[in-house]
Image (tube, rainbow, N blue to C red):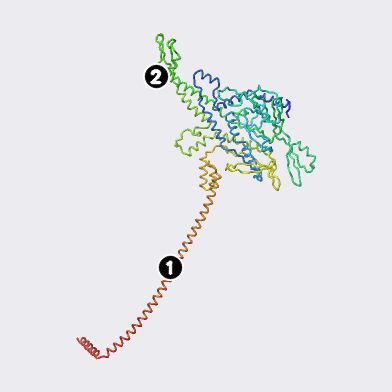
């Protein structure tokens, strides 16, 4: 399986030895110092001993670590997302599947963790790395594409590279020490005898360049010794992982099949093998061109484990994230900008505390012989209410306290302004850490403006560097996915809008029409890119207020607003809202029906009242007609009775007029009338 030392092995080792030059050592020096300061190891052994010798405090006031940690959180607050855009617009759905696969690989690789490690390395060491590879044993032998973080101090890059992402580098090398057990785990085909036959370069171990005082080792470089599973001391072997860019000649063949013109891209060597089979009249054109390809070699000690394996795609599978690129592979870190101020703050506080100690426990000036027991005098001099004894028989003066010189107020100013300077340099002020004036006197939108303006520096890094870093990573992930996933495979990812719900997607789905090939470039022509700003921290209160305003305007629905909150179990809430909306709709329908029934009831009541009135009128008319009939009957009866009475009276009058007395009365009346007339 392995090959003894060859010319290629010697070449790789020779490149590695020459890369450990003064420029890299200078960068490694500053990178290790900045990283140690970030971890809180800010005193070397020499500085610590010097402070102890002078009886000065050895503590530090670490203002640097919170600044870097806040920057890390700001840049990695959310999970990155990729999107794919079809070039001709006809393959949008299939193209988007590639972005979905990138999300799946990111989830399976614990991408948020490895991204945070890469960002931390960029901020503290100057550069961070993410590497894309294939684990052939995952998914029961079908394999999975994986994303891993790499220790920046183990990476050696072509020193002539000028591109921030090393796209112009001719080679990239990873070199570190591995134990025997690590080699057997990484390369299961290696046997015990194979490893024993490898020469050991254990004298070339990597070490920290600074001897910082630390209670525990802060890096693998600090671990000098170890034991294996048998309890014996391990043996370290120098390991090289060499990636080299080469130009490989390809051809683009235009040919005709059943009156259809097709095009294929292949290596020139492959074309030569099949050129004689295709009829010359069907070949329309053969266009040669050179294509970048990456080849990988694995070397352990002086043995070649893997020799020039061609990798998918045209880019190095190692993607760098440089915080501040200076035109070469030796980038500067954000932590290095803060080291000087951190040292200034530490020294100022050490001096102030030391001065406070001298003021509270003064030194004494005593002539020789005036103090009989100096140890007891030292002990009692710092005890409140103690009586200090001296030798009165001596010729010298009594001991006198030596007060320290007044402390310059500049030390207080330096300590205070040092913190403000660190906030200014990092762009992470106290307000962003929940500190400062939180009395509420500043208007809400004023705080949002401070949040926006105060984070523009870190947003600039995210926009100009981090976004391109993730876009490049997404392209490489897709190249490896097309290379590996060539059988039907179901992937499950959480939806960005609702992390609690999972969607299933099928790669290379077998349909009656055939296989929808995920890996076929001729069927999936697209561009994959990172969704800019999706990892950045967003002021959730401002975002929620904006969504609420859009909801009030009727532009979005309440479910969209709900997904922007921190409420748990959003899916159940959405389902409950849906049920409530259905019930509300049913209630509204019932209310409409009730209103309709009420309206109809009012009409019926009016009709009923009208009917009742008509009935009353009809009944009154009947009563009136009855009364009328009775009145007419009674009147008729009365008339008949009156007529009968009149007839009877007439008879009586006539009988009376026939009598004599009536005649005399008539004469008397007539005579009386005449008399009255004469008068």
C-alpha gap between disc 1 and disc 2: 115 Å
Secondary element type, mark 2: loop
Q: Is residue 366 left or right of residue 647?
A: right
Secondary element type, mark 1: helix
Q: Position of residue 183 (x, y in %)?
A: 67, 28
Question: Which tag is nearer the camera, tag 1 or tag 2?
Answer: 2
The N terminus sits in image quarter: top right
Residue at label 2? Answer: 385
Q: Position of residue 349 (x, y in %)?
A: 48, 24
Foreground residue, 655 or 673?
A: 655
Circles 1 and 2: CB atoms closer than 8 Å: no
Instruction: Judge the density around disc 1: few (<14), some (14-19), many (≥20) Cα neighbours within 10 Å.
Output: few
Q: Is residue 515 left or right of residue 551?
A: right
Q: Earlier in the sequence, mark 1 or mark 2?
A: 2
Quadrant in the picture for residue 369: top left
Foreground residue, 492 or 418?
A: 492
Foreground residue, 579 or 310?
A: 579
Residue at label 1? Answer: 613
Q: Is residue 309 left or right of residue 65?
A: right
Please report the residue visible at 65 percent of the width from the left and 22 percent of the height from the top. 204
Please report the residue visible at 42 percent of the width from the left and 70 percent of the height from the top. 617
Quadrant in the picture for residue 563: top right
Q: Is residue 52 at least partly visible in the picture?
A: yes
Residue farthest along the left direction in this orientation: 679
Q: Position of residue 407 (x, y in %)?
A: 45, 21
Please report the residue visible at 45 percent of the width from the left and 65 percent of the height from the top. 608
Q: State whether residue 577 is above or below residue 656.
A: above
Q: Position of residue 651 (x, y in %)?
A: 31, 88
Please report the residue visible at 35 percent of the width from the left and 81 percent of the height from the top. 638
């Amino acid at each position: 399986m392995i090959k003894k030392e060859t010319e290629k092995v010697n070449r790789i080792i020779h490149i590695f030895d020459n890369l450990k030059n003064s420029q890299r050592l200078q960068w490694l020096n500053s990178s290790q110092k900045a990283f140690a300061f970030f971890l809180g190891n800010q005193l070397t052994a020499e500085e610590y001993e010097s402070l102890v010798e002078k009886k000065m405090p050895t503590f530090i006031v670490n203002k640097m670590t919170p600044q870097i940690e806040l920057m890390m959180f700001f840049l990695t607050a959310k999970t990155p997302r990729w999107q794919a855009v079809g070039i001709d617009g006809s393959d949008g759905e299939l193209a988007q599947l590639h972005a979905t696969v990138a999300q799946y690989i990111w989830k399976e690789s614990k991408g948020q963790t490895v991204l945070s490690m890469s960002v931390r390395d960029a901020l503290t060491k100057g550069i961070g790395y993410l590497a894309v590879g294939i684990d052939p044993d995952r998914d029961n032998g079908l394999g999975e594409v994986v994303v891993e973080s790499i220790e920046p101090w183990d990476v050696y890059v072509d020193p002539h590279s000028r591109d921030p992402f090393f796209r112009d580098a001719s080679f990239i090398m990873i070199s570190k020490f591995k134990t025997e057990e690590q080699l057997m785990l990484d390369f299961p085909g290696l046997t015990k005898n194979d490893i024993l036959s490898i020469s050991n370069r254990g004298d070339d171990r990597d070490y920290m360049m600074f001897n910082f005082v630390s209670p525990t080792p802060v890096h693998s470089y600090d671990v000098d010794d170890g034991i294996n599973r048998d309890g014996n001391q391990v043996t370290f072997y120098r390991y090289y992982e060499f990636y080299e860019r080469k130009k490989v000649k390809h051809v683009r063949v235009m040919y005709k099949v059943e009156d259809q013109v097709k095009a294929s891209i292949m290596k020139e060597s492959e074309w030569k093998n099949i050129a004689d089979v295709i009829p010359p009249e069907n070949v329309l054109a053969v266009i040669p061109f050179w294509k970048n390809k990456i080849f990988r070699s694995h070397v352990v000690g002086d043995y070649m484990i893997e020799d020039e394996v061609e990798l998918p795609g045209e880019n190095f599978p190692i993607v760098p994230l440089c915080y501040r690129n200076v035109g070469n592979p030796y980038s500067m870190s954000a932590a290095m900008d803060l080291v000087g101020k951190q040292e200034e703050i530490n020294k100022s506080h050490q001096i102030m505390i030391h001065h406070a100690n001298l003021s509270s426990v003064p030194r004494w000036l005593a002539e020789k012989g005036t103090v009989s027991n100096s140890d007891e005098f030292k002990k009692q001099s710092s005890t409140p209410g103690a009586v200090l004894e001296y030798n009165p028989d001596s010729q010298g003066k009594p001991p006198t306290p030596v007060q320290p010189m007044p402390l310059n107020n500049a030390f207080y100013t330096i300590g205070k302004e040092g913190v403000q300077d660190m906030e200014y340099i990092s762009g992470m002020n106290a307000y962003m850490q929940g500190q400062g004036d939180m009395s509420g006197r500043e208007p809400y939108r004023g705080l949002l403006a401070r949040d926006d303006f105060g984070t523009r520096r870190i947003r600039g890094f995210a926009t100009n560097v981090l976004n391109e870093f993730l876009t490049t990573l997404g392209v490489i992930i897709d190249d490896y996915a097309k290379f590996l996933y060539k059988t039907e495979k179901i992937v499950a990812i959480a939806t960005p809008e609702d992390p609690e719900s999972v969607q299933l997607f099928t790669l290379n789905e077998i349909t009656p029409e055939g296989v929808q090939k995920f890996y076929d470039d001729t069927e999936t022509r697209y561009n994959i890119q990172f969704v800019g700003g999706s990892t950045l921290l967003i002021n959730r209160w401002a975002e929620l207020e904006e969504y609420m305003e859009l909801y009030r305007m009727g532009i979005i629905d309440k479910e969209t607003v709900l997904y922007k909150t921190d409420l748990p179990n959003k899916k159940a809430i959405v389902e409950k809202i849906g049920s409530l909306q259905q019930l509300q709709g049913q209630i509204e329908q019932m209310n409409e029906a009730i209103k309709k029934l009420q309206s109809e009831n009012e009409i019926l009541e009016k009709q009923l009242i009208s009917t009742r009135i008509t009935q009353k009128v009809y009944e009154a008319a009947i009563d009136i007609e009855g009364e009328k009939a009775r009145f007419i009957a009674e009147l008729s009866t009365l008339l008949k009775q009156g007529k009968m009475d009149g007839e009877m009276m007439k008879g009586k009058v006539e009988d009376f007029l026939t009598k004599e007395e009536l005649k005399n009365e008539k004469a008397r009346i007539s005579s009386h009338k005449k008399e009255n007339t004469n008068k």
